[in-house]
Amino acid sequence: MTYQIVASTTVSPDGIALFDQKNYHIDYGEQPKKDTAGLLIRSVDLHQTPLPDDLITIGRAGVGVNNIPLAEAAAKGIVVFNAPGANANGVKELVFAALTIGARPMLAGSKWVSNLKGDDIGVQVEKGKKAYVGTELLGKKLGVIGLGHVGGLVANGASSQAFGMHVVGYDPYIAVDTAWHLSHHIKHAADLKGVLEDSDYVTIHVPLTSETKEMLNADAIAMMKPGSVLLNFARDDVIDEDAIIAALDRGHLRRYITDFASPKLIHHPKVTVFPHIGGSTTAAETNSAKMVVQTMKNYLETGNIRNSVTFPDTDMQFASPLRLTLIHKNVPNMVGKMTGVLSNYELNIVNMMNRSQGDYAYTMIDLDQIDPKRLQKIAAKMAQIDDVIRVRVLSH
């Protein structure tokens, strides 16, 4: 079987190249076409784009998926993949650059030097450099909110000998695997106040959810140490922009450094804004593309799901000749209805797995070899079950 893939030209070619020519046909564009099985994108906004019924999967070669209508995709049985952690090192390095900028007025000093005129530049520099005296990061306290892919790297790096900062982290949802990789030098705060109140620098690394929206609001900022520096390389809406500006204006915050531009921020004298370049390195773009293509291929060819934002991770060894996959609503007795159909055909189930996430669930059923026409009839019967959204037949 040959799968039709539409890939954006902004996606790294090294990732697209993983779609082998034997099983995949690649068209370039940013809109799904008829018979498109997979859509591979970076930043194109799909919220106004009709998602065809034939579309099986969408791959986002990056982390954020706010450009994809996730609810619509899930309702149509479209599995959306992203690439968590693939750009984490690129973001981490930019955060460290931002920390240094927050400690020393390097950008202002560089701008001043570039405007000097005359033959005595060296003399002018020596006389004027006192205006650009900064501080050092060594021994300062860094608060890290969110200890996932990026936050964990930032926390570990800042607490290392290279930077020598005292690090306190806060993450009520930290995964066990992530916790194992955190340095023992990092102290853990029990709540948001514990990470804000004594930190000289605070950096936030959380996804945008209903719980994290404007997480750093006026009340949270009031807990921060006077004269501290706030960094945001997560999402623009995790902070209350008006509260940040008010805190800067009254001197409670010394500086705000972010990767997210807005009209209110870009001309403020105490704000440094980057053009959303946290993951904009060639390595990060290549890693993201490769990761998401591999997960798309794995799903299309085996039905296994990993790193999806619409359906649960479901991974089962594909050792039998045939596999049925079913995307369905997460309602009672769905598995019973599926096995009931199979029992009517007197089929042996070799292996089976069911996983649920919110309103939806995913089931994989491995079967012994049977006549293809008979299998298609079974798949059609499965599709007629109430609350079943998509049925696929895969051969091994």
Image: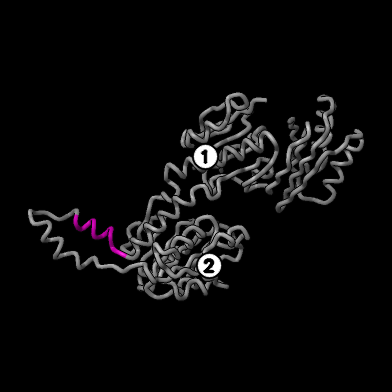
Disc on the earlier residue, 2 or 1: 2
Residue depicted at x 57% and y 41% = 292
Q: Which residue is mark 2?
A: 184
Q: Is residue 359 left or right of residue 386?
A: left
Q: Quadrant of the C terminus?
A: top right
Residue depicted at x 49% and y 34% = 14
In front of the other: 396 or 240 = 396
Q: Is residue 309 left or right of residue 237?
A: right
In front of the other: 110 or 180 = 180
- Please identify the dominant SS of the magenta region: helix
Identity of the amino acid at label 1? Ala
Residue 22 against residue 40 in the figure, above or below: above
Where does the image place residue 107, in percent across and percent down from the top left? 28, 58
- Specify the segment rendered in magenta: 104-113
- Give me the C-alpha separation between circle 2 and circle 1: 33 Å
Q: Find the residue positioned furthest to the left.
A: 119
Where does the image place residue 58, in percent across and percent down from the top left? 60, 39
Query: Do tag 2 and tag 1 residues touch (Cβ < 8 Å)?
Result: no
Q: Which residue is mark 1?
A: 289
Density class for disc 2 (Cα within 10 Å; few <14, some 14-19, many ≥20) is few
Residue 247 showing in the rendered view: no
Where does the image place residue 364, in percent across and percent down from the top left? 76, 41
